[in-house]
Amino acid sequence: MNKQVLLSYGGGGIEMNDFLNDFILKNINSDNSQGLSEDAAVCDGFSKIAFSTDSFVLDPLFIKGANIGKIAACGSINDVLMMGAKPKYLTLGLILEEGFNLDELKIILNDLSKTAKEFEIGIKCGDLKVVPKGKADKIYINTTCIGDALGFTKNNNIGTKSIKEDDVIIISADVGRHGACVMAEREGFSYDISSDAKCLYNEVKDILKYDIKCLRDATRGGLASVLNELSRASKLDFIINESDIKISDGVLGLCELLGFEALELANEGTFVCICDKKDANEVLKELRKYNEFANIIGYTKKSSNPSVILNTNYGGSRLLQMPKGELLPRIC
């Protein structure tokens, strides 16, 4: 087989069918991919569904600890997990540029399918398009994840409407590593920073036995964006302690060099958990099984003007604003 994507691979004829069967399907390696050869997939086992779709345009395609394939799988799967739902199926849409290297595509597909297969999530259906050289940037991926909203717990009321005053705010890991990693790779810096990209299946499954009010992964816009979104949606102040938020030395160093705010940098395997204060220590104990930097970072409070208030390391406090503009394009 040719070593690059040909325009004819998207043409609907013999070349496209051979490419799908001899390359794409072989490198997905899913035990549950029968829908990829049909016009639609038939899914069962749902009484109430949760689903999310995402498109991924990472630049560069390969970073330390991840690539666009792994991130595409984690991104949609994690979004469904954040609703307390059990992910079951994934769709895969590929837009390839003519001339894209097939060895790189093989790695991307293998990592995507490996991530899904680890948690018994089947890749059920998909789509392939090929555009002429110069009309895209190597590869874009779209994934949709479908999950059983009652697959983990039968009393699933997770969402912003469940957040109340005096609930506790927990972060599942240190912050900013994905955004900092992409930035370092682009600029050729030698900082030892790996993306935090991971599927959050086990963490979420383990904490749902407690009174979890809301979950939200801190992707684009980072922790600052997520906290502001949740504060506005719940109409509550979020009181946060800066000293309780863990940031690696590599991330801090890069932020100091380039003038970025670590709390605004993207994450791909870190989430915010809002829970009842009676369960906070037990939830934290579960999360620390997976990341030692998980921590309680604050609480919610009634307010007439909901905002995020950051108690700083210097004894003062300030508003933690929602990020403005495009801090770092094409990070996921």
Image: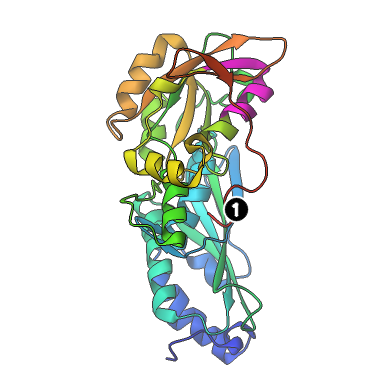
Q: Position of residue 169 (x, y in %)?
A: 48, 20
Instruction: Determine if the magenta segment contains residue 298.
Output: no
In the displayed structure, 281 sits above or below 27; it is above
Q: Dominant secondary structure of the magenta stretch? A: helix
In the displayed structure, 136 sits above or below 302; it is below
- In the image, farthest residue toward the right: 304
Q: Which image quarter: residue 14?
A: bottom right
Front residue of 138/157: it is 138
Mark 1: which amino acid? Asp
Front residue of 139/245: it is 245
Q: Which image quarter: residue 175?
A: top left
Q: Position of residue 20 (x, y in %)?
A: 51, 79
Q: Position of residue 81 (x, y in %)?
A: 49, 38
Span colored in magenta: 227-239
Q: Position of residue 69 (x, y in %)?
A: 45, 62
Can see residue 211? no
At x 52%, y 55%, the residue is: 90
Q: Which residue is mark 1?
A: 54
Lateral position of residue 204 relative to residue 216, left or right: left
Q: Which image quarter: residue 162?
A: top right
Mark 1 is surrounded, within 10 Å at the Cα level, by few (under 14), some (14 to 19) or many (20 or more) other residues, namely some
In the displayed structure, 224 sits above or below 169; it is below
Front residue of 33/176: it is 176
In the displayed structure, 189 sits above or below 21; it is above
At x 67%, y 9%, the residue is: 303
Instruction: Determine if the magenta segment contains residue 234.
Output: yes
Image label count: 1
- Secondary structure type for disc 1: strand
